[in-house]
Image (cartoon, coloured by chain):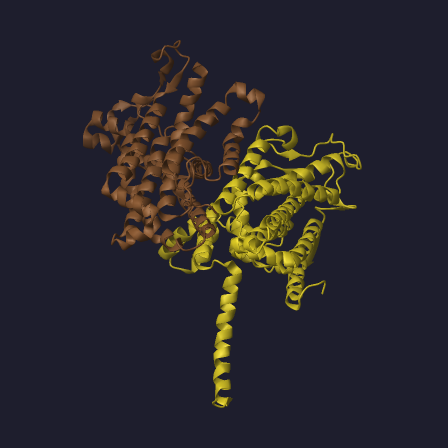
Chain colours: A brown, B yellow
Amino acid sequence: MDAIILQILNGLDKGSAYALIALGLTLIFGTLGVVNFAHGALFMIGAFCAVTLSRILSISRTYVDETQKDFLGRPLEVKVPYAHDIFGPEMGAAIIDWAVPLSILFAIPVMIAVGVIMERGLIKHFYKRPHADQILVTFGLAIVLQEIIKYYYGANPIPTPAPAAFKGSFDFGAVIGFDANTIIYPYWRLVYFAFAAVIIGAVFAFLQFTTFGMVVRAGMADRETVGLLGINIDKRFTMMFGLAAAVAGLAGVMYAPINSPNYHMGMDFLVLSFVVVVVGGMGSLPGAVLAGFLLGILESFASMKEVINILPGINQIIIYLVAIIILLTRPRGLMGRKGVMEE
Amino acid sequence: MLGLGKKDTTLVLLVACLTMLAPFLLNPFPEGSAMAQFNAGYPDLMQRFVIFGIFAIGFNILFGLTGYLSFGHAAFLGIGSYAAVWMFKLLSMNVIPAILLAVVMSGLFALLIGFISLRRSGIYFSILTLAFAQMMFALAYSVLTPITGGETGLQLAPDDPRVLDTATSASGNIPVPGLFGMEMRDTAKLELGSWVFTFNVGYYFSAIVMLISFYLAIRIFRSPFGMMLRAVKSNQQRVNYTGLNARPYTLAAFVISGMYAGLAGGLMASMDPLAGAERMFWTASGEVVLMTILGGAGTLIGPVLGAGMIKYMENIISKINSDILHSWFAFLPDGLEDFMVAIVYPFIGKGWHLTLGIIFMLVVIFLPGGLVEGGQRIARLFRRKKQAKGDDASKAKQPAE
């Protein structure tokens, strides 16, 4: 029993990342009808927003402290981040420590800008082109974005730690009545899951309860009619692209402490996210979220020792296997709508 | 000739001439000169030109004719490589059985995968093929290690059985792949003044295989079968309404293009007898898509051009470093020189993927037909100018009606 709970928990953080990326992909697909292969790159850019902010915060000035000596007896060179000067030593240290959560504030405008520029500058011109062209141009864009990041940040993963308050693990088993230390779970992953849940809830609430969201949903259902009613639907769809980019970016920001950002992390997630979208049903937002968590949990179950002993290698292929079975038996995916990308 | 129209015959002959004379054509700069780094006439690179040419020709039969965008074609390349290496290990170092097994095995896998994937079309087909390829990559990397060699890849070993051949050569080394006594790595060098031309057995073998597969591809393009595939691309519904089942045709195209990929994989293993799982990774599948699109999908010569261009860029651009750049811009004033170097630097050396991505995007945006369409547009521009002149002249002569 405790093993099962542990696997479900393990699946949640990966599942959250899948769900967030798939949610953004589906938003773009549902509104603009574009298959965005560059979405993984947006996730990666988000993660690098966290890297950038923590680097900016720790920019330091160096001065020579005459009172302290290093081991050779020379005056010690001390590095002091400017943040300490501006906010005072304690506050400054706290800000640097909390760089990753603070990056959320930094990443939202950056990602919305990236998304809007991408849509207005490039993707706008591809609405009327075949899906193959959309896939290809966004694939090319993904390569370019990835290489630009690689040029500036190098090819190696950059460790980006979570705030010290979230280091260590949470003894989940003790809380719900199992023996201590049977189900332990890193705090940051809990934070990630909670964060993902909040974001997903916010996106759904935005679409469901605001006028803007209502118009967007109407546009998803019938773009032409909404346009005929005198609403500038293109502008709103562009905003939705920005929103989707922000969702992917935030998923990336918070994922940075779990997996040190490197330039190809987006591509690694992208393939899986596409599978998630297809399993959930193209164009279905709840489907994307459901499938994201489902596949994340399934993957972590498949990597249990007991399962691998029976079916070696199943943990590597389970997601693809599920996708193939779903596509062949339920072509529309778990919650796909009728008439959306049937062919 | 050989059942080809006049235009196609010229095309085949042209390609034949180019490939046969490649060691000369690709080495236009004398050895040791500043431009020698742009020479591409060394065996390793020339082999890659033709082998990836075969891969792209095969991919084009599927994507160019039917419009089905497979994102998992590298899987067949990998299977071909593994099959060929196993043939070297078990049977003999002759490349013919190795390549035959490579083609057959990849054909079988393509039949299975195609049968399942082709139930869906459009984006779903792309994702299904991607899923299959990633699955095979993951399996080859982990569980199937006894068959695939896992992370280290599949290599020849001195204690392989090699039923029809000696396990080790006379000198006690592992023998190298060959064709009836000729070793694939045998090269002859011809020095003419300061030029050095290299002729490699492996290259010529691959080039001949490529010419044969190019010829077959043309026959497929011109056959009723090829017309049928094009019909599927332009409107599958209409094909269905005329009472034809498109599935067998697309499946045949998928299997053929899978076999081409297997052939390329087999050749790759014949040139260098090892096979690794990274050949099946999805970026490798993306690469063949890039090649085909860059050259021109649906055209005969496009994929070969695209493959050649990407492989050339990969080799040449990634070799350039900042010293070379400085020597190029040396004629400029110092400040301007540094500025130019700083601008160009991200695109060369390790940054060649960036260049590739940008070129690819530009091609997809402005030239969906690839390099071939670009060439045609330029040709049309010239022709129109000529025609315009001709029209003026003829108008003057024609009497009013």
What residue is drawn where x is 40% and y is 48%? A34
Q: Is residue B144 left or right of residue B294?
A: right
Residue A264: percent from left, percent from top: 44, 38
- The residue closer to the viewer here, B323 or B172, is B172
Residue A133: percent from left, percent from top: 46, 52
- The residue closer to the viewer here, A33 or A79, is A33
In this rendering, is residue A179 above or below B238?
above
In this rendering, is residue B209 above or below A190?
below
What residue is drawn where x is 64% and y is 67%? B7
Which quarter of the figure has residue B194? bottom right
User: Residue lying farthest top?
Assistant: A179
Which quarter of the figure has residue A230? bottom left
Residue B93: percent from left, percent from top: 75, 40
What residue is drawn where x is 72% and y is 35%? B89
Tell me the quarter of the image containing the N terminus of chain A: top left
In this rendering, is residue A162 above or below B271?
above
Residue B121: percent from left, percent from top: 51, 46
- The residue closer to the viewer here, B76 or A55, is B76
* Residue B281 visible in this rendered orientation of the protein: yes
* Residue B309 visible in this rendered orientation of the protein: no
Q: How many circles with numbers are drawn on the protein?
A: 0
Q: Is residue A50 left or right of residue A157?
A: left
- The residue closer to the viewer here, A56 or B20, is B20
